[in-house]
Image (cartoon, helix red, strand yellow):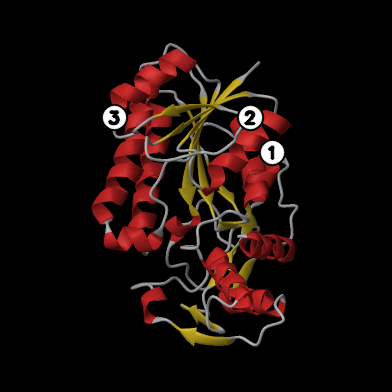
């Protein structure tokens, strides 16, 4: 049986990816988290790992010998990155390089999927959408800059040391269980609280005119496993829906699912210092390599996310 290792599995995507790898792909799955994190009930053997310790990574890889590695460990919040750039740089760049260096010490070459972000493209110019992998990068925030750096180093390491590294630029992914620091989950949580009467009927929002490319997390993890199998080493692949939606439209969809009269107000704390007007993926390359395309509609994901918060 082939083995898969998910590094940094305690985040939003981790449990979805573990279940997909175990149940749909039939792999024996191992996963890592930080000592203070919990992973719940997942079909994987769990290990504590700090990716800032290269020796710990080397030790674990020699012990497990995975065929596939999915590097999810990241500080992935743009707002946290503005407040704590040092942590973001340490985890996203140094942690990624520690993994790549550890791979050089192995006696075999596992297939490794390094997760980056659509935010790396940054200020997309007029006429550049949907944006392809060869487009120039103009990262507009600290988080995006660290992910662009990880991608560049991954590309260099893959060529220089013949490593089986596949780089991903994942656009916004959403679904039940996502933390409310992310926009769709935040809106759904607010509506659920208004419905329960534990919050006044006012939605507090940031920039509603930004357009983003949203994909259901269950589609995203299918893309990751497809790339682990069929992606070309040293290459970068966009993972997104291929269609940008205005945040205002998402807000309207969520409010329409409630029978409450809800007022909308801008919260200055939710406005980013710099925001990119539109991010939309060209997903031709991944489709040609793996046959992948999203299957779950935005409306379906929004409804399931709202129901998730209603149950809580």
**For mark 2, does the 10 Å Cα neighbourhood hold few (<14), some (14 to 19), or many (20 or more) residues?**
some
Residue 31 drawn above or below residue 258: above
Marks 3/2 in contact by CB < 8 Å: the verdict is: no
Left/right placement of residue 247 relative to residue 34 reads right
**For mark 1, does the 10 Å Cα neighbourhood hold few (<14), some (14 to 19), or many (20 or more) residues?**
some
Residue 32 drawn above or below residue 275: above
User: Of the residues tagged 1 and 3, which is closer to the observer?
Assistant: 3
Residue that label 2 marks: 229
How far apart are the alpha carbons under marks 2 and 1? 8 Å
Q: Which is nearer the eye, 196 or 204? A: 196
Taking the spot 61% from the left edge, 86% from the top edge, the residue there is 262
Residue 290, numbered circle = 1
Q: Which is nearer the eye, 90 or 28? A: 28
Marks 2/1 in contact by CB < 8 Å: the verdict is: yes
Taking the spot 36% from the left edge, 37% from the top edge, the residue there is 96
Q: Circle 3 — which element?
A: loop
Residue that label 3 marks: 53
Q: Circle 2 — which element?
A: helix
Q: Which is nearer the eye, 249 or 47? A: 47
Q: Compare marks 3 and 2 and give the one earlier in the sequence.
A: 3
Percent from the top left, x then y, of residue 179? 50, 57
Q: Which is nearer the eye, 18 or 140? A: 18
């Amino acid at each position: 049986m082939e083995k898969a290792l998910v590094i940094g599995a305690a985040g939003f995507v981790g449990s979805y990816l573990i279940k997909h790898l175990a149940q749909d792909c039939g792999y024996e799955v191992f996963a890592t988290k930080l000592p203070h994190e919990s992973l719940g009930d997942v079909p994987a053997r769990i290990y504590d790992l700090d990716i800032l310790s290269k020796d710990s990574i080397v030790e674990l890889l020699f012990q497990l010998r995975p065929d596939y590695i999915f590097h999810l460990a990241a500080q992935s919040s743009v707002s946290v990155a503005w407040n704590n750039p040092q942590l973001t740089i340490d985890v996203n760049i140094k942690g990624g390089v520690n993994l790549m260096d550890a791979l050089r010490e192995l006696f075999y070459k596992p297939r490794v999927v390094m997760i980056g972000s659509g935010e790396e493209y940054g200020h997309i110019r007029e006429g550049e959408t949907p944006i392809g992998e060869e487009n120039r990068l103009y990262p507009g925030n600290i988080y995006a800059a660290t992910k662009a750096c990880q991608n560049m180093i991954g590309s260099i390491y893959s060529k220089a040391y013949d490593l089986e590294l596949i780089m991903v630029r994942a656009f916004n992914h959403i679904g039940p269980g996502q933390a409310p620091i992310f926009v769709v989950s935040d809106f759904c949580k607010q509506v659920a609280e208004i419905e329960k009467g534990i919050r006044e009927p006012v939605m507090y929002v940031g920039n509603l005119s930004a357009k983003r490319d949203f994909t259901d997390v269950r589609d995203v993890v299918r893309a990751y496993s497809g790339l682990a199998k069929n992606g070309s080493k040293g290459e970068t692949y966009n993972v997104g829906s291929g269609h940008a939606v205005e945040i205002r439209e998402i807000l309207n969809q969520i409010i329409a699912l409630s029978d409450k009269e809800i007022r909308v107000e801008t919260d200055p704390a939710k406005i980013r210092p710099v925001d990119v007007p539109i991010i939309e993926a060209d997903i031709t390359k991944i489709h040609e390599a793996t046959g992948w395309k999203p299957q779950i509609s935005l409306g379906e994901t929004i409804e399931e996310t709202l129901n998730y918060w209603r149950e809580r």
